[in-house]
Image (cartoon, rainbow, N blue to C red):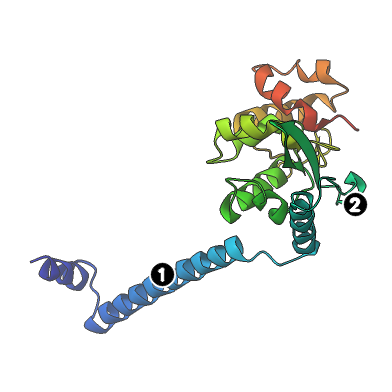
Amino acid sequence: MWKNKVHYYFRFILGMTRSEILGLLSLFIFLLLADITSRWMEYQSRQQAMVSFQPTYWTQTLIDMEKSHQKSYAPQTRNYTYRPANQYPSQLASHSQKGNGNKKLAWQIQINQADSLAWIALPGIGPAFAKRILAYREKLGGFYQAAQLKEVYGLDSLWVNEHIAQFHVGKGVYRFLYINKADWKEFRHPYLPYRQANLVLNYRKQHGPFQNWEDLKKVQQLNEAVWQKLSPYLSFEP
């Protein structure tokens, strides 16, 4: 029986006493329970983070827009009125579209500024997707084009294409990769494989700072396609 084999191994091969075996078993059980508890607490924390969106100015904004929308369709009036775009926050606005004699409101999203509630206002986006979009945006350092939303895990490319006219980049990238200053810990980006980062850091160490894109292309075995994709995030400041 396996228990007898384990007991024989510890007692006669390792020379452990009964007390030492019991102590080792107790330690193993304690560490296992501690690991399970830690994983459970982490899971609970993630679940709370996914659903804990605090009401902000957006709550009143959405209510006001809904009231305006209802009034514009009221039977007793034929004069449709809309709030000026400058009355809405910079990350969320509305515009009207004509079609079959009806008015249709569509959300306009500043994808580098919009918070969770602004994303949830879009059809098909729940708290989980909103959290993923914000997390990926932070890893990138900002979107430089709306098509990058297709890279968000689980977000359907067809959905992005369907709503792409509603997305606005605004100021675009807000965090850059300083290729002449960053050390190894800072030299990270979702578009940058480890091997390519290592090549550039070693070249910089041997030859000094890069002046421009042409200097960067001098690195042997450089994958130019990778760096072209990364180029909007690069800064050659000394």
| Comes first in the chain, label 2 or label 1 | 1
Residue 197 visible, this orientation: no
Going by the image, does 41 lie left or right of 11? right
Q: Quadrant of residue 117?
A: bottom right
* Identity, as a three-letter code, of the amino acid under mark 2: Gln
Residue at 24%, 68% (x, y): give it: 14
Q: Is residue 126 left or right of residue 144?
A: left
Q: Residues within 10 Å of mark 1 (few under 14, many from 20)?
A: few
Q: Which residue is mark 2?
A: 87
Residue 26 or 72: which is nearer the viewer? 72
Which residue sits at x=61%, y=45%? 123
- 144 shown above or below 130: above
Question: Looking at the figure, which quarter contains the N terminus?
Answer: bottom left
Q: Residue furthest front?
A: 76
Residue 203 image point, x, y percent: 74, 25
Q: CA distance from mark 2 to mark 1?
A: 50 Å
Which secondary structure, mark 1?
helix
Q: Which residue is mark 1?
A: 36
Frontmost of labels 2 and 1 is: 2
Expressed as whole percent of the image width and height from the top left, the position of residue 94 reads: 79, 44
Q: Measured from the top left, where is residue 71 in percent x and y?
A: 78, 54
Q: Residue 157: horizontal and vertical position, in percent?
A: 57, 31
- Name the one closer to the observer, 86 or 143: 86
Q: Residue at x 78, y 43 (%)?
A: 112
The picture quadrant where one finds residue 5 is: bottom left
Q: Residues within 10 Å of mark 2 (few under 14, many from 20)?
A: few
Q: Amino acid at mark 1?
A: Ile
Residue at 23% x, 72% y: name it.
15
